[in-house]
Image: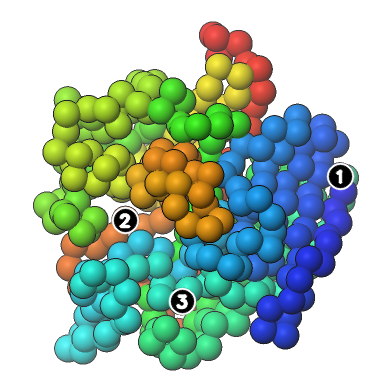
């Protein structure tokens, strides 16, 4: 096991660093302290995730690739949080809604500390998000950990504590490609999810859970991702692909994404995985010009978004600890029968 880091720049008086974690099998994970970002996952030197060309590119244009997005990832309807008789207003930054924490945690420079032993290589990243930043109440201390073991599993965790009543529902926004260059349509997906949440024109859920059975969203048996993306389904057509929460049924694994040569097994203690298939990539943007539609797929492990402004499920009491765990196990050249 081995850790190292390299300084590649400065931002707001802070050093920007790329941290490398390497296991005894030669698997390498690269993490940026900008945004506590998962930059690369190299399996036999093949990158398994969607990455920009240079570490320095990540702070130049916000695109969420691999970032730790918070305080809330996803949308809050009209930016409103109702608690008791009060309505707390968050910044409106997408249509009539609040999205991805405003100028969120993925745009901050985090402190970090790498370490390793005979069993794992890890980096701990910490951030202090002050009361009132992005109009969120409470001084919030966040701890993110990336830990690579010799089973080729990357473990990701978020812990946080606030000194005031607040809301928190972060996510790691990594896009998986399994090394596919153009798009993820020919990858195969299986999920332990019997229900999903349909969404309205703004991407917010609006009618509760619906069964995946008989829909394009049924991945209870392994299915080509492109079969869903090409389906004649109003939900798919309206969002230009998948942009939907899947409610996990508690069986493991949560999801398995595979190609002919590789796969990633996703497990989490979150109740849902939000699947987004890079619908908005269109070869524009200075740093994402190489990415077209469906260039990658996310498994955003979090509490599913609420329909209205009752955000009780993502409310943190003062000094209550938030905990979230995700693992991504990578396998190479597995047999057809596995």
State yes or no: discs 1 and 2 in contact (Cβ < 8 Å): no
In the image, residue 292 above or below residue 109: above
How many angstroms separate mark 3 from mark 2 (CA)?
21 Å
The residue labelled by disc 2 is 304
Q: Are marks 3 and 2 in contact (CB under 8 Å)?
A: no
The 10 Å Cα crowd at callout 2, few under 14, some 14 to 19, many 20 or more, is many
Q: Earlier in the sequence, mark 3 or mark 2?
A: 3
Left or right placement of residue 140 versus residue 212 in this view:
right
Q: Label 3 vs label 1: CA separation?
A: 35 Å
SS type, badge 2: loop
Instruction: Nearest to the eye among marks 3 and 1: give it.
Output: 3
Res. 209 in view = yes
Q: Does dot 1 land on a helix, a strand or a loop? A: loop
Quarter placement of the C terminus? top right
Q: Image point 40% across, 46% down: which residue?
A: 282
Name which quarter of the figure residue 297 lies in: top left
Element class at badge 3: loop
Q: Residues within 10 Å of mark 1 (few under 14, many from 20)?
A: many
**CA separation, marks 1 and 2?**
36 Å
Nearer the observer, 77 or 273: 77
In the image, which disc is placed on residue 1? 1
Quadrant containing the N terminus in the rendered view: top right
Can you give x and y, in whole percent of width and height, for residue 142 in the image? 58, 73
- Say which label, 1 or 2, has the lower sequence index: 1
Q: What's the mark number on residue 103?
A: 3
Task: State the residue at coordinates (41%, 73%).
Answer: 101
Left or right: residue 124 compared with residue 73: right
Closer to the eye: label 3 or 2: 3
Residue at image coords 66%, 17%:
333
């Amino acid at each position: 096991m081995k850790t190292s880091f390299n300084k590649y720049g400065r931002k707001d008086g802070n050093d920007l660093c790329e941290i490398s974690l390497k296991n005894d099998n030669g698997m390498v994970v690269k993490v940026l302290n900008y945004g506590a970002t998962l930059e690369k996952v190299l399996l036999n030197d093949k990158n398994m995730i969607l990455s920009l060309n240079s570490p320095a590119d990540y702070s130049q244009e916000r695109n969420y690739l691999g970032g730790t997005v918070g305080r809330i990832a996803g949308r809050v309807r009209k930016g409103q949080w109702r608690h008791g008789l009060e309505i707390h207003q968050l910044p409106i930054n997408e249509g009539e809604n609040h999205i991805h924490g405003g100028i969120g945690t993925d745009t901050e420079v985090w402190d970090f500390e790498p370490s390793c032993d005979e069993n794992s290589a890890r980096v701990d990243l910490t951030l202090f998000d002050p009361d009132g930043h992005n109009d969120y109440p409470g001084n919030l201390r966040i701890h993110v950990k990336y830990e690579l073991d010799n089973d080729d599993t990357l473990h990701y965790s978020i812990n946080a504590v606030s000194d005031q009543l607040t809301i928190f529902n972060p996510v790691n926004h990594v896009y998986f490609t399994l090394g596919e260059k153009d798009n993820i349509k020919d990858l195969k997906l299986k999920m332990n999810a019997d229900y999903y949440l349909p969404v309205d024109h703004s991407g917010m859920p609006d009618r509760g859970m619906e069964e995946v059975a008989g829909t394009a969203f049924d991945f209870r048996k392994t299915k080509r991702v492109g079969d869903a993306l090409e389906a004649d389904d109003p939900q798919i057509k309206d969002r230009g692909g998948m942009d939907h929460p899947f409610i996990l049924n508690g069986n493991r694994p949560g999801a398995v994404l595979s190609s002919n040569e590789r796969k990633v097994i996703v497990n989490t203690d979150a109740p849902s995985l939000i699947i987004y298939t890079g619908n908005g990539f269109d070869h524009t943007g200075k740093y994402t010009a190489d990415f077209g539609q469906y260039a990658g797929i996310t498994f955003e492990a979090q509490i599913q978004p609420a329909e209205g402004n009752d955000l009780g499920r993502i409310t943190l009491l003062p000094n209550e600890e938030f905990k979230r765990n995700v693992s991504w196990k990578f396998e190479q050249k597995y047999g057809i029968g596995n």
